[in-house]
Amino acid sequence: MQIKAIRGTKDILPQDSRLWRSIEEKAKNLSEVYGYRQIRTPILEEARLFVRSIGKSSDIVRKEMYAFLDRKKRLLCLRPEATASVVRAYLEHGFDKTISLAKFYYLGPMFRAERPQAGRLRQFYHIGVEAIGSASPYLDAEVISLAVRMLEGIGLQGFALHLNSIGCQKDRQKYKTNLKAALKNKLKSLCADCRARYKVNPLRVFDCKNPHCKEIINSLPKVAASLCRECQDHFSKVKLALESLNIDYAFSPHLVRGLDYYTKTCFEITHPQLGAQNAVGAGGRYDDLVSDLGGPQKPAVGFSLGVERVIAALGPQKTEAIPPKLYMAAIGEEAKRTAFKVLDSLRAKGIAATAGYQDSSLKAQMRQADKLGARYVTILGSEELTKKTIILRDMQNKTQEEIPINKLFEELK
Ligand SMILES: [Zn+2]
Ligand SMILES: [Zn+2]
């Protein structure tokens, strides 16, 4: 039986990888412009890293982690997101001791065992940044503006930035109590999932997509009323800083992110093109995560963009694989041998060139060159070999000329 890709995973084919590369390049370049440096952490981590950071009650830890025992009976996991990994690496390599504000960006695959559906894959890609070491509201604004500028740079239009503050731990405790009180006599009208959420972490009811629950949820108290003075002040400064950059946002009083580690600012970027799973990216502040993972108190903020979501939101794109500049056709054993050497010397000089390697007729080789979209084709047969020449055919202008082999590079250049 033929082996197929695992459900919820996807091959990115040559005709699409060009778009992927261009998105990645733009994201990398802009991150560097903003002073972020690339970090590449392992895909495999200890599962407890995510249990401790994302939280036991989160959907990710409860049912979506790819966790398994290895041969030494350690509980490992394919990373479901990168923030915890970056913080682990930050501590492990002593950035907390050597640099007051450490700024990282990353890109790579993440894994969640979700039910595959539109917009949800089991292996999906994130591009993200983490800035660790400052509580300044300007840093929140920098991170948010970088996310926005990145999407703009990629060419995405029509997305919306939703912004909220969920306050410090104390505010959240207070809010959870208020929320529980408000939910208590509405429990019967909520779905089974929400009733379970009420018990473990009432904030999770905001993750519910059930339209009936949504209605009830919209009438619940808002976090803003539970914010302490300092958190209120921080949030106004973030908003003012964004306004000073002319970045549009919508205040979303019920936006609480699905991970335990967020504090203060949280945000989500959505796109109307996407349907139910409409977020292209999200992020926020996580002032306690570094200390929760055993480090000193280091306030931090970050975001991640979902690459597949961004691509879906971009809509149909002109996709094509990059064609070779030159296709070398050769007839006969000796000509093939010579062509193979010429091919190598051209490639060494940076000319994108290829050959067919089949024992096929000249006609068949020309057809293949055409299919690949090669700009030029060279033809080498026994006649040319004796004259030390080669035929260079321009596939666009449908013209050809015979030139000395050793002038080929000059001609192509
Ligand atoms: Zn507070
Ligand atoms: Zn519900």
Image (tube, rainbow, N blue to C red):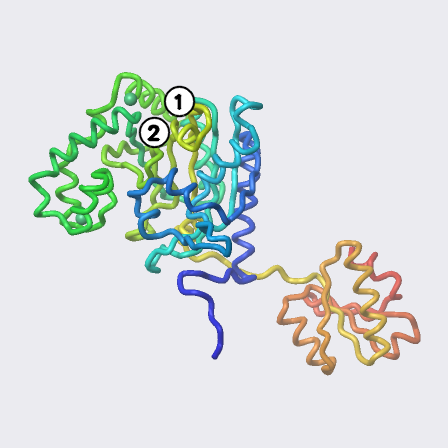
Quarter of the image for residue 167 reads top left
Location of residue 162 with respect to 385 vertically, above or below: above
Location of residue 321 with respect to 203 vertically, above or below: below
Q: Position of residue 309 (x, y in %)?
A: 40, 51
Q: Residue at x 31, y 38 (%)?
A: 257
Q: Position of residue 126 (x, y in %)?
A: 46, 46
| Residue 265, numbered label | 2
Please name whichever residue, 93 or 83, is drawn nearer the observer in this view of the structure. 93
Instruction: Determine whether, in the image, residue 222 is placed left or right of residue 6.
Output: left
Q: Point out the image quarter for the C terminus.
A: bottom right
Residue 359 visible in rendering: yes
| Amino acid type shown at disc 2 | Thr
Q: Residue at x 88, y 70 (%)?
A: 389
Please name whichever residue, 399 or 19, is drawn nearer the observer in this view of the structure. 19
Say if mark 1 contacts mark 2, CB within 8 Å. Answer: yes
N-terminal-most mark, 1 or 2: 1
Quarter of the image for residue 172 reads top left
| Residue 137, numbered label | 1
| Amino acid type shown at disc 1 | Pro
Q: Position of residue 129 (x, y in %)?
A: 48, 36
How many residues crowd around disc 1 within 10 Å: few (fewer than 14), some, or many (20 or more)?
A: many
Badge 2 element: strand
Q: Position of residue 247 (x, y in %)?
A: 38, 30
Q: Residue furthest front?
A: 72
Q: Residue at x 84, y 73 (%)?
A: 337
Location of residue 346 with respect to 357 vertically, above or below: above
Instruction: Determine whether, in the image, residue 355 is placed left or right of residue 260.
Output: right
Location of residue 331 with respect to 133 vertically, above or below: below
What is the CA distance from the residue labelled 1 to the residue labelled 2? 9 Å
